[in-house]
Amino acid sequence: MKFGKRLWLLIFIKLALLFLVLRLVFFKPELAEFDTDGQKARHVKENLFMQGNIDDGSITTKD
């Protein structure tokens, strides 16, 4: 029983570390620098238009 508890503890620690590293590297809070929802929405809208994901309000596909 002691081995099983230690194994589960090790698995939990590894998952927690993996989650923290992934969160710090890939999920940076870009919108945290804006104060209002309007500023956040404007930032998202501008980035979507710059990347070409949205054209005149409709979603376009790239062939």
Image (tube, rainbow, N blue to C red):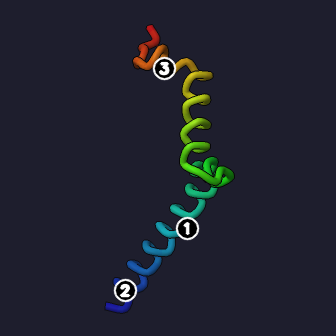
- Which residue is farthest top? 63
In percent of width and height, residue 29 lies at 61, 53
Q: Nearer the viewer, residue 25 or 55?
A: 55
**Residue type, label 3:** Ile
Residue bearing mark 3: 54
Q: Give the answer, above or below, for where 8 lies relative to 49.
A: below
Residue 45 in the image, given as x and y percentages of width and height: 55, 31
**C-alpha distance separating marks 3 and 2:** 51 Å
Label 3 SS: strand
| Element marked by disc 2 | helix
* Among numbered discs 2 and 1, the one appearing first in the sequence: 2
**Rendered image: mark on residue 17:** 1
Which label is found at residue 5?
2
Spatial separation of the CA atoms under disc 3 and disc 1: 36 Å
Given residues 8 and 21, the one toward you in this image is 21
In the rendered structure, which disc, 3 or 1, sits on the residue that comes first in sequence? 1
Residue drawn where x is 37% and y is 91% of the image: 2
Q: Are marks 3 and 2 in contact (CB under 8 Å)?
A: no
What whole-number distance in Å separates the C-alpha atoms at marks 2 and 1? 18 Å
The amino acid sitting under disc 2 is: Lys
Badge 1: residue crowd in 10 Å (few <14, some 14–19, many ≥20): few
Disc 3 crowd rating (10 Å Cα; few below 14, some 14-19, many 20+) is some
